[in-house]
Image: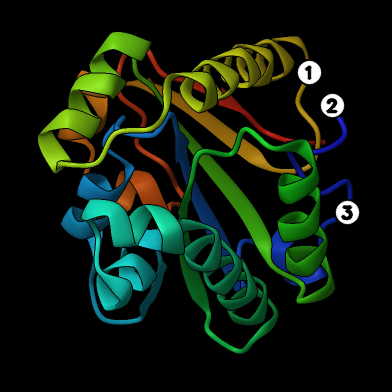
Amino acid sequence: MTALASPHRSPAGRAGRGPVLVVIGGLPGSGKTTLLRRILRPGVAPLDSEQVAGRLGRTGPLYRLLRPLVHVRHRVRVLRTVAGGARLVVLTDPWTSRRWRAAVLRAATRAGRRVRVVLIDAPPAAAVGGQVARGRTLPRRRMRRHVRRWAQLLADVAGAGAGAEVVVVGRGEARALDAGQVLGPPAGLLPGTHRRPGP
């Protein structure tokens, strides 16, 4: 598993101290932003594309035209923040792109950040329902691509663990998680979740 987790940890990360990156991953509409909003507290630096989209307008034809700009601005902001001085960064992301995962995790490694990944495993139909509820849906082709990549991501998690701590929860379980369980450590995991600590 090359891109799920950084293959290196800093000495600070190994001891449970130092800066941390928490990634909340899941299909678009799975509830990542909802979870992030619930666990926000002083000292957390949140990174969510909704923050950029909100400045440019979230809906309508204009947003569809601006979506590539939203993604670019968000990703630049993510890499800068992960490389910066915030002690606790929480990123929401589909986490389905290998190249993007690798870029984020390289930045985290260089910054000496311990990495924790919380994956919300929502059924595709439920994720689409979440998109409808928020008023923005993905084109079917893009959603199918996310679904394929998500399945591969979960297979990678089940098959191996490398570097980062990875937790997989169902959508219903994610609604019950509190800040301590998401941000860890120590992580109080719900029944039915899976923890894959790195070596």
Tag 1 residue = 160
Residue 183 found in image quarter = bottom left
Disc 3 marks a residue whose amino acid type is His
Q: Secondary structure at mark 1?
A: loop
40 left or right of 88?
left
- Label pair 2/1, CB-CB below 8 angstroms: yes
Closest to the observer: 164 or 73? 73
Q: Nearer the viewer, residue 146 or 84?
A: 146
Q: Secondary structure at mark 3?
A: loop
Q: Are marks 3 and 2 in contact (CB under 8 Å)?
A: no
Q: Comparing marks 2 and 1, which lies closer to the viewer? A: 2
Q: Which mark is residue 1?
A: 2
Color style of the picture: rainbow
**Nearer the N terminus, badge 3 or badge 2?**
2
Q: Residue at x 50, y 30 (%)?
A: 167
- 155 to 26, vertically: above or below: above
Q: Assign the N terminus to one quadrant of the image.
A: top right
